[in-house]
Image (cartoon, rainbow, N blue to C red):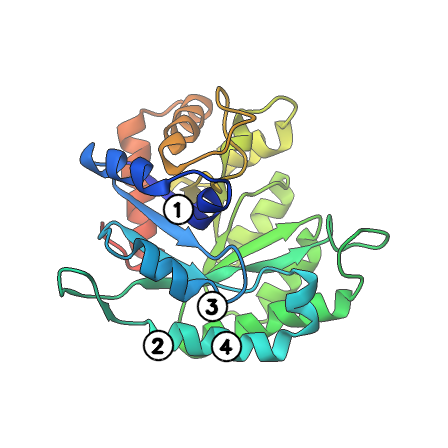
Amino acid sequence: MMIDTHAHLSGLLEKGINPHEILERLFINNFTGIIDISLKPGDLNSRIKEFSSYNRIRFASGLWPWPASISNRKKMLEKLEKDISNNMTIHNKNGDLIHPICALGEFGLDRNWNGEGKQGSADLYGERELMEMQMDLAQRLKLPVIIHSRDAAEETADILSRFPAVRGVVHCFSYDTDAAKKFLDMDYYISFAGNISYKNVRAILDSCTFVPLDRLFLETDCPYLAPIPFRGKASHPGMVEEVYKKTAEIRCIDLETLSEHIAENVKELFGITF
């Protein structure tokens, strides 16, 4: 019973990998579920068309802080809200009414790519405003959020603190336990990816053991961050098993208990029972 709480399935398509072969094999073997996350602005409709036939996939959509999204934030936010509103309920290929949208995201701050002297956007005010606008949208739509934060822990926490009615998860966590405590104190969940299996990631491992089981998510961030022993390859949701195994090892817990906690957390935050 394993859930990949954060995957970009369309990223596999971009790498020339057929995700359907992977998904069919996983679901035949009773893989529990996947939350598919936006990769590019405006891709929600195409992702739902591609993957909504699988009843164990749900979707999130947001505006990652790409330079183009930052500079065109008002127009793109309008389209995002329209696309989400139009897809809150749909009929799948079997004619069943489903609620495919479970969250707004991912979005947030990335000062690794967008910081001073970087190749990305130097409009840090615009990056911050793009995040604030999406927090406001999540509040209006009553959706949880999936937060991206890199080299910007303090500023991310500051923005989240001003929207206390919004809940969510900080995905692919890369900070220390002090930062983890700040997000936990704001009632956020924290998610870890395949990089917990890499060398020299002591701060991440410490955070992974620090986060309470009832606030923990696990993910692949597919097609990125393939865990050991797959590092260097494109990751896919099936590799989340290695993330679960590593987490169970460092927390001294059995896989079944860990999986049950993750499933309960997904249900509690996103309202999903796969």
Q: Earlier in the sequence, mark 1 or mark 2?
A: 1
Real-space CA distance between mark 3 and mark 1, rounded to the nearest whole angstrom: 19 Å
Are the two marked residues, 3 and 1, in contact with CB atoms closer than 8 angstroms? Answer: no
Question: Picture coordinates of residue 106 (x, y %)?
Answer: 52, 58
- Crowding around mark 1 (Cα neighbors within 10 Å: few <14, some 14 to 19, many 20+) is many
Which quarter of the figure is the N terminus placed in? top left
Q: Residue furthest right?
A: 117
Q: Earlier in the sequence, mark 4 or mark 1?
A: 1
Residue 66 in the figure: left or right of residue 76: right
Kind of residue at badge 4: Lys
Q: How many marks?
A: 4
Residue 168 seen: yes
Are the two marked residues, 2 and 3, in contact with CB atoms closer than 8 angstroms? Answer: no
Residue under the point 51% across and 69% down: 164
The residue tagged 3 is: 166
Kind of residue at badge 3: Val
Question: Picture coordinates of residue 130 (x, y %)?
Answer: 63, 70
Real-space CA distance between mark 1 and mark 2, rounded to the nearest whole angstrom: 23 Å
The residue tagged 2 is: 86
Residue 103 seen: no
The residue tagged 1 is: 5
Q: Quadrant of residue 141?
A: bottom left
Q: Earlier in the sequence, mark 2 or mark 3?
A: 2
Real-space CA distance between mark 2 and mark 3, rounded to the nearest whole angstrom: 22 Å
Are the two marked residues, 2 and 4, in contact with CB atoms closer than 8 angstroms? Answer: no
Circle 1 SS class? strand
Residue under the point 50% across and 40% down: 15
The residue tagged 4 is: 79
Kind of residue at badge 1: Thr
Real-space CA distance between mark 4 and mark 3, rounded to the nearest whole angstrom: 21 Å
| Nearest the eye: 177 or 45 | 45
Kind of residue at badge 2: Asn
